[in-house]
Image (spheres, grey):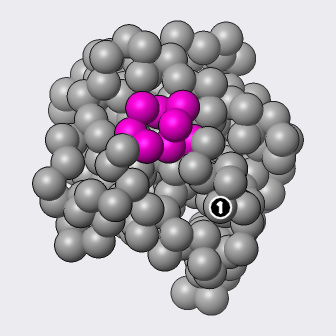
Amino acid sequence: MKTITLHNTLPNVFSQRTDIVSDIWQRDVELERGKLYLIEASSGTGKSSLCSFLIGYRHDYQGSICFDGKDVRTLTQGDWVRIRQCSLSTLFQELRLFQELTAWENVQIKNSLTHFKEDAEVSRWFEALGIADKKDAKVGRMSFGQQQRVALMRALVQPFDFLLADEPISHLDDNNGRIMGELMTEEARKQGASVVITSIGKHIDLPYDKVFKL
């Protein structure tokens, strides 16, 4: 996938509003593969809706969203499966980890399907993120910040053209946030991919190609 394009897109819930001031809603916006983007939002401006639209979980919006010029509303379930396997990886705000599994198992349950990363590289990530001692700990007993780091690693063990990271460092200190940013951009460079980060406050300090105000 080379481009994600939004054309005059607006959540249906905002359809009666006349006070929309946004760099994304009701605009023509193109996200290109290989670039870094930050989407800054305030509470209630539709950030969660936007993320759900981009990953195909919801379609309750006006206008269009296209992947390489193809309207996502025309995609089949099989199309979405392939896109989520090979083109679009997501680090969810709510993480969606398996609480009863260990940190290592949560990453490897995906890596065992993609066969994308060697165990040694995943172990290096655990070390870099300061949770090597938590590899065998059940995720449900870890702090939310530790779980965010596990969720990042899970998002990176697959090929992607775009990585959507929804508020990835909301519960992290500056140092761990910096390390997460380095891992995301390092992997994106390897794959020639884009990183799209959303934030309603704290965000990773990166050399963004474009910052949008939602």
**Which residue is labeled 1 in the image?**
119
Which residue is drawn at the image coordinates 81% and 35% (left, top)?
189
Q: In the image, is residue 120 above or below residue 73?
A: above
Expressed as whole percent of the image width and height from the top left, the position of residue 195 reads 63, 36
- Which structural element holds mark 1? helix
- Specify the principal SS of the magenta part: helix
- Asked whether the viewer can see residue 60, the reply is no
Which residue is drawn at the image coordinates 39% and 55% (left, top)?
135
Is residue 128 part of the magenta span, yes or no?
Answer: yes
Direction from residue 197 to residue 194 in the image, left or right = right
In this orientation, which residue lies closer to the viewer: 173 or 118? 118
Expressed as whole percent of the image width and height from the top left, the position of residue 50 reads 41, 46
In this orientation, which residue lies closer to the viewer: 35 or 98? 98
Disc 1 residue type (three-letter) = Asp
Image quadrant in which the C terminus is located = top left
Expressed as whole percent of the image width and height from the top left, the position of residue 57 reads 40, 68
Which residue is drawn at the image coordinates 60% and 70% (left, top)?
111
Residue 169 quadrant:
top left
In this orientation, which residue lies closer to the viewer: 28 or 159? 159
Q: In the image, is residue 93 above or below residue 186?
A: below
Is residue 181 part of the magenta span, yes or no?
Answer: no
Magenta stretch, residue numbers: 125-132
Expressed as whole percent of the image width and height from the top left, the position of residue 105 reads 42, 70
Which residue is drawn at the image coordinates 39% and 39% (left, top)?
131
